[in-house]
Image: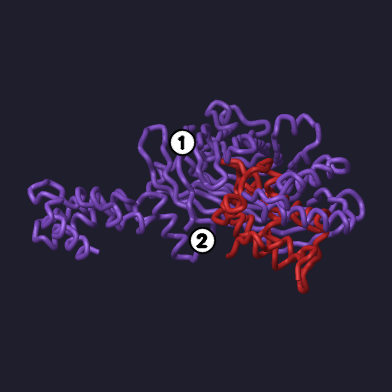
Amino acid sequence: MSWEKNNRAHACLCVFEKWHHKKRDVPFVATGEWTTDFLIKSAAGESAAMRSKKARAHAELLDGAFSGLYRAKYETNFDRDTAIEQMLAVLKNKTMKLKDLGDPVDQAYQFIGEL
Amino acid sequence: MALSLRAGLVLALAFGVVDARVQDPVHLLLDVFPAADPCPRLEPLPAEACREILDAAVDSTADSPVDLEALETALADELTKPDFLNSALAKAFGGEVPLGLEFKELDGENGEPALALSYAIDYDLASKGVTADGAWNRRYALTFNATGTYTQDPLENPRDFLDTKLTASGARSTRIPEQSLEFGAQLTEAAVRNVACEGETSPECEGAADEVFALFDSTMSFLKAFRYQEFGLDAGLESDQEFDAKQRKFSAFFFSQYESWGSDSLLDTLNVTPAFRVGLDSISPNSLTPRALAGDDSSYMRFSGEVSLWIPLGARVPLALTFNYRHFREISPSDVVKNANLDSYDIRTLSLTGTNGLFVTYSSGRLPLDQQGDDVVELGWKTYF
């Protein structure tokens, strides 16, 4: 898994998460170390059912931010369902970090200016 | 490793850096030549375990007696620590640990730490989204969920509650309005510049840190919050870890999460993201549940609720404060159940959580099938190499 400053998908994902989590001053590399528990705003002690729903909510939110705000398009072989499922697979995994979400986002979305 | 250390020790002895009469020449040598210490490179092997092995290896090459029993005891302590076991699990599965397996050390009220293995399975069997033109997107899903915590001795388990269920649900989430291509391009370029200009002071990077956030802030004019709501039906089984006490469960539930988009709402001022889940459960217990053992093994209805709060602590502090409260209450319990104090269960958890895995957690209360409450403290560092 890569986490590259010069990758448009990674940069757009990173900046949105910083804004959304009210942590604007955190550097790119440190942001990549954010756990999925932190990304989906999971509270310690919560039930698996609640964590699962929060992961789903965050995947829907990211899809909305990429499609509606950044105006990214889905890559060939991806649509809204498959893009969300791809992100959800990472967000449901407690061992994953933001840097693990970079490549799945890059695979599913084509951001403006990407070749 | 032992040979290179031995060679270093011989050199150190030859040049008089280490006196052969000192009690512990290996540690003295490592103090003088810290770069020779292989233990930092062998993480996540615990440093103490590494040192014990090194000492034994050097002793054996120097024909000194090695206390194998003491070594075994020391290693048994060090190698059963959750950090090491979790790292070993992650390495064994290439970083993707299956079934959400995680080792934990739980400190119960009696002060004795118990090594526990928890699992959390969350699998989507089917899912279909519906993109709407209105304010909401909709989704329907069928999911399988299982979670629980095991300890070697069930009596040491302060969270002896396994929950397994199949869920059919419908959900709706805020549809973020589609912006113009011009706005999208401006936002994308600003995000790229924000990241590329980190630490740069060149004229081209002037204002790059704030530009993208100002664009995101401008979306507050048409979006006040992101909401996610889900309702559905669960069918499942609750049990203790040995499956002696168990009860079938059918329930209807509603879940909602509200994330302020940064407007001037009260929740935004307080900087809180709340979420809650409420359910009405139909429970059929077996004869070994605490309630049945108290004298009432009839089926019953139960209210279940859960509230969770997430609060980030400042823009520069990599921490969030979290609170979770779960409550289970039997509807119209019998006197037998009330007198045995088995009609209501609740558990609350307060945590300070780092962005990258550092956490300290305190929880108190009890879950269904627990006969008495426990205060449990978890302190640790979740790392996955």
Residue beneath label 1, please? B377
Q: Earlier in the sequence, mark 2 or mark 1?
A: 2
Total numbered labels: 2
Question: Secondary structure under badge 2?
Answer: loop
Depth check: give the residue in front, B44 or B350: B44
Residue plotted at (40% across, 42% down): B155
In the figure, A54 relative to B59: above or below?
A: above
Q: Does residue B237 appear in this view? A: no
Q: Amino acid at mark 2?
A: Val
Q: Nearer the viewer, residue B303 or B132?
A: B132
Question: What's the residue at 39%, 55% (across, down)?
Answer: B44
- Mark 1 Cα within 10 Å, few/some/many (few <14, many 20+)? many
Location of residue B42 by image quarter: bottom left
**Where does residue B261 sit, x and y in percent of width and height?**
78, 41
Q: Is residue B298 above or below residue B135?
A: above
> Mark 2 to mark 1: distance in Å?
24 Å
Can residue B348 be seen at all in this image of the molecule?
yes
The chain coloured red in the image = A
Give the secondary structure at mark 1. Answer: strand
| Residue at figure coordinates x 66%, y 36% from the top left | B309
Pointer 1 chain: B
Q: Which residue is mark 2?
A: B97
Apparent colour of chain B: purple
